[in-house]
Image (spheres, rainbow, N blue to C red):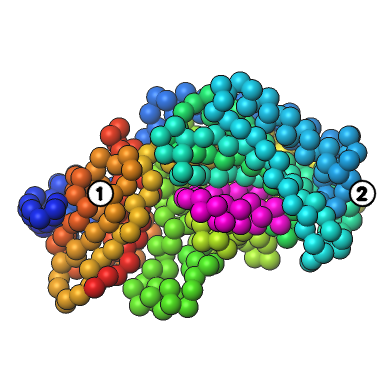
């Protein structure tokens, strides 16, 4: 095997080290550059124990209880104790509070409310309330990860707020994921903060999530990832086929909040596939595709499906990395449909069409991702690549990341969908790599003392 050199720079000293050997058959790229192969981050005993606690029966009970409120339409009654969005809000708040009571102060719960003035699909001033539970980080609480589902529902006519709209799959399933993960994680102490949310107003225009993202932004909160679980309740497609071990993850390339200057820069360096959501998607596959979850994560290179949108968009608009989990193939007879029977076919978003073990596996994918994020160092900031001179090597630099004991420079061919090589540079904050920046893509990730790794950060050019 032909080796190449990787030059690693720490402070003023420059030390040359030989490339890590690539095992035979691992990847043919090993003959063309430095570094060892990038491998998945396997779940440790703590994560395996955590994921075993995810309970499909509890998830089923949550979905059935939310469906039993009749309708959870954003415009439905807010003061009826048994029917409408207000009753669902109060029940969810009580459930999160019950979890918080057993958390020894780690988890706190709040109702995050505002009055939405008349707008699209909101004909009159309407109070919109998110139920937000925060598991405060033990050592790096300013770094935040968010997981949510929306607890509002709808009928065929999006403005019909009186008829039944059980909303089991869309989106009691996603709320059940958020609630169950709050229960499982609330007795643990991650380094970073995890927020479990049930938001309202999604069907009317992503109002609740937009408000939550705006509140985070106004407070200067370092939200490093947000995942919405929206329509994660069934493994069955409309043709009757099942795919019980796949979950889709929608991750945008061109950033929603991109400025014209950033767009020009992206076009010049080719960063369309290296947005923060795409780096999150690569991270999810690395930590959540394993025997502990029993799932495959199918990454979709889109912000969302055609003609659809979700709560992650509100976070993308604020420049936060965000992505959407959705079941592998939808059955449209059981979402956004009035409950009825036509020609012997049952329509409506009813609990009987949900696959509760499937939702539990989706919860494990989310749990593996959140725990791996919140117990590793954060994503490196200030990652740059020098472009002052025409050279056939590449020099990267980055800021120190709290909790990191070392760093890895990742690279891949420009046509590769995921990182193929990792170069351990130790605690250095700069690295000179014997590869042309014109020919490959680079990233930098932080490594903690226990070997847990952050998502990668894509470098911006600097003179």
Instruction: Report helix, strand or loop for mark 2.
Output: loop
CA gap between label 1 and label 2 equals 55 Å
Q: Where is residue 458 in the image (x, y as percent from the top left)?
A: 35, 60
Front-lying residue, 92 or 361: 92
| Mark carried by residue 87 | none
Q: Is residue 4 above or below residue 351?
A: below
Left or right of 95, for residue 226:
left
The residue tagged 2 is 163
The residue tagged 1 is 408
Picture residue at 54% right of the left edge, 28% below the top: 106
Picture residue at 80% right of the left edge, 38% below the top: 88
Left or right of 421, for residue 377:
right
Picture residue at 27% right of the left edge, 56% below the top: 398
| Mark nearer the viewer, 1 or 2 | 1
Left or right of 401, for residue 387:
left
Q: Position of residue 405 (x, y in %)?
A: 25, 40
Magenta segment boundaries in residue numbering: 207-231
């Amino acid at each position: 095997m032909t080796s190449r050199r990787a030059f690693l720079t720490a402070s003023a000293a420059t030390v040359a080290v030989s490339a890590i050997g690539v095992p035979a058959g691992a990847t043919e790229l090993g003959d063309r550059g430095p570094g060892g192969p990038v491998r998945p981050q396997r779940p440790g005993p703590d994560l395996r124990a955590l994921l075993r606690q995810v309970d499909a029966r509890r998830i089923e009970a949550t979905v059935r209880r939310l469906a039993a409120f009749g309708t959870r339409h954003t415009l439905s009654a807010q003061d009826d104790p048994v029917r409408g969005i207000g009753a669902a809000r109060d029940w969810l708040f009580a459930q999160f509070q019950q979890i918080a009571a057993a958390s020894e102060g780690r988890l706190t719960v709040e109702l995050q409310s505002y009055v939405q003035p008349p707008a699209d699909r909101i004909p009159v001033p309407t109070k919109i309330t998110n139920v937000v539970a925060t598991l405060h980080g033990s050592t790096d609480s300013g770094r935040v990860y968010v997981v949510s589902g929306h607890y509002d529902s709808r009928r065929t006519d999006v403005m019909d707020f009186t008829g039944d709209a059980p909303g089991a799959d869309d989106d009691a399933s996603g709320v059940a994921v958020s609630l169950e993960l709050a229960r499982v994680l609330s007795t643990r102490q991650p380094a970073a903060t995890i927020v479990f949310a049930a938001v309202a107003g999604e069907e009317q225009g992503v109002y609740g999530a937009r408000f939550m993202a705006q509140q985070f932004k106004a407070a200067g909160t370092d939200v490093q990832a947000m995942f919405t679980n929206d329509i994660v309740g069934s493994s069955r497609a409309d043709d009757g086929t099942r795919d019980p071990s796949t979950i889709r993850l929608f991750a945008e390339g061109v950033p929603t909040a991109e400025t014209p200057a950033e767009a020009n820069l992206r076009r010049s360096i080719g960063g369309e596939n290296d947005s923060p959501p795409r780096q999150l998607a690569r991270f999810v596959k690395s930590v959540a595709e394993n025997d502990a979850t029993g799932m495959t994560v199918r990454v979709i290179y889109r912000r969302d499906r055609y003609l659809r949108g979700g709560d992650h968009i509100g976070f993308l608009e604020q420049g936060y990395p965000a992505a959407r989990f959705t079941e592998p193939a939808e059955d449209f007879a059981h979402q956004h449909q009035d409950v009825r029977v036509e020609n012997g076919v049952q329509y409506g978003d009813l609990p009987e069409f949900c696959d509760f073990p499937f939702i539990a596996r989706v919860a494990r994918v989310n749990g593996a991702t959140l725990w791996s994020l919140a117990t590793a160092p954060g994503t490196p900031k200030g990652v740059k690549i020098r472009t002052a001179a025409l050279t056939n090597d590449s020099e990267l630099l980055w800021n120190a990341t709290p909790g990191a004991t070392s760093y890895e420079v990742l690279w891949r061919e420009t046509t590769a969908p995921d990182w193929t090589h990792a170069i351990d540079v130790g605690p250095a904050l700069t690295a000179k790599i014997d590869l042309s920046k014109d020919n490959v893509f680079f990233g930098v990730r932080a490594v903690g003392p226990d070997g847990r790794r952050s998502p990668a950060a894509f470098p911006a050019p600097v003179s």
